[in-house]
Image: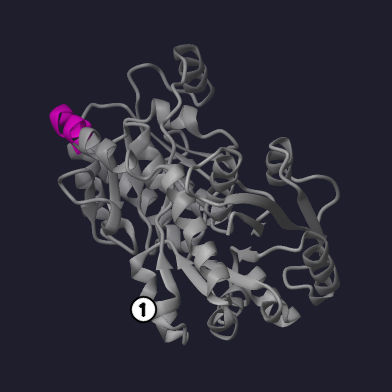
Amino acid sequence: MERLRILATVEPHSLAGSAKAVLEFAKEATRHHPDVPQVDLSVLTFNRRQGETYVARLFEDMAIPVDVIHERDRFDTNVIPQLQLACENRGPDVFWTNSVKSHFLVRLAGLNRSIRWVAFHHGYTTTDIKMRAYNQLDRWSLPRADRIITSSGAFVGELVRKNVQPNRIHVQHMPIRPFARVGEKEKSDLRKRIGCNDQTRILLSVGRLSYEKGHADLVRSFPKIRDLVGGLELHLLIAGEGPEQLRIEKLRRSLNLSNVVTLVGQQHSIDPYYAIADVFLLPSLSEGCPNVLLEAMAAGVPVVATAVGGVPEIATSGKNAILVKKHDEAGLASAAAELLKNRELRDRLVSSAHEIVSRKTPEAYFRSITSVFSQVCADDQ
């Protein structure tokens, strides 16, 4: 096919995970790529609030058409007529879904019977009992998709257990762009805002504040890191928001860390935080292909991460990161302290990590995903 019409779903309020990947795809779709079909992309998002969302505005600023489905709660089945109308108006060749909710609604509305359907499985959050129950809906939804893309080879077995045929599964790691340089004044201003001087060493963690991201382990490990580095002045920054925030704040207070551990919230622009970081920490208990790992590598920040999910598919311990077991607070602390004290090790890991991110370009991602769409369309011909 010379031209593909794609309708993609995105989450409305945070440019993370799946929304960031769709945005990168959209940027590439506006460029000419030889030997690749022209992509006409439109975006569909859900909103329970009044007014335009941040993510929708990003796509609209790129002249990408956006349909907003108005809903009352997390799984409002009254959105189905709106969903059907959006598909009728857009006439996509492929419907590209990116969440448990959108997978479920496509199947419930029967859209998979008239539109080719590619579902992207990004893994699950376990924020509450209701969400865990919703995650089980994929067992009913995903087997009916024409293709399932997943961000990690670690998820393939999970999908097969949900009765997805292995020949319908395509593993696709996330893309990353080169890190944009941050000016010295912007870095200095950020340090002042968080109460750090030029000598303070910054440890950074970025991600949704939910249980599977392991931030509680990180906070508990921080006193051990301070002990191991002796007189170095340290500050831990945690960027993100989510249901674990109150628990993490309570833990921070109970350990008397309020003046050296700062929760900076959700940041639309995270680059300045990477720019001032000395070490990046990813303490997750489960992962797919974490964007933040690739972002830290692209920013030239040495990484300590737990060897879970797709992390070992990207990073090799001792070569381009240091990997530790999940829930290993002592190992996390030891690895972080070693990086803080060993400049040669930091430089070696950063140099090797650059080779990884140089291969995971948005153009390569665009070509791979477009190839999946083309294959799905060709199946019916």
Residue for point 59% across, 63% down: 98
Residue 229 visible in the picture: no
Residue 67: % across, % down: 79, 55
Q: Secondary structure at mark 1?
A: helix
x then y, percent, for residue 26: 60, 45
* Extreme-top residue of the structure: 185
Please state the extent of the stretch shown in magenta in the rendering: 339-348
Tell me if I can see residue 269 in this picture. yes
* Numbered-mark total: 1
The answer to whether 19 is drawn above or below residue 33 in the figure is below
Q: Residue at x 42, y 85 (%)?
A: 161
Question: Is residue 340 on the magenta stretch?
Answer: yes
Q: Is residue 100 left or right of residue 327?
A: right
Task: Say which residue label 1 marks.
Answer: 157
- In the image, what residue occupies the spot 66% across and 65% down? 93
Q: Position of residue 61 (x, y in %)?
A: 72, 35
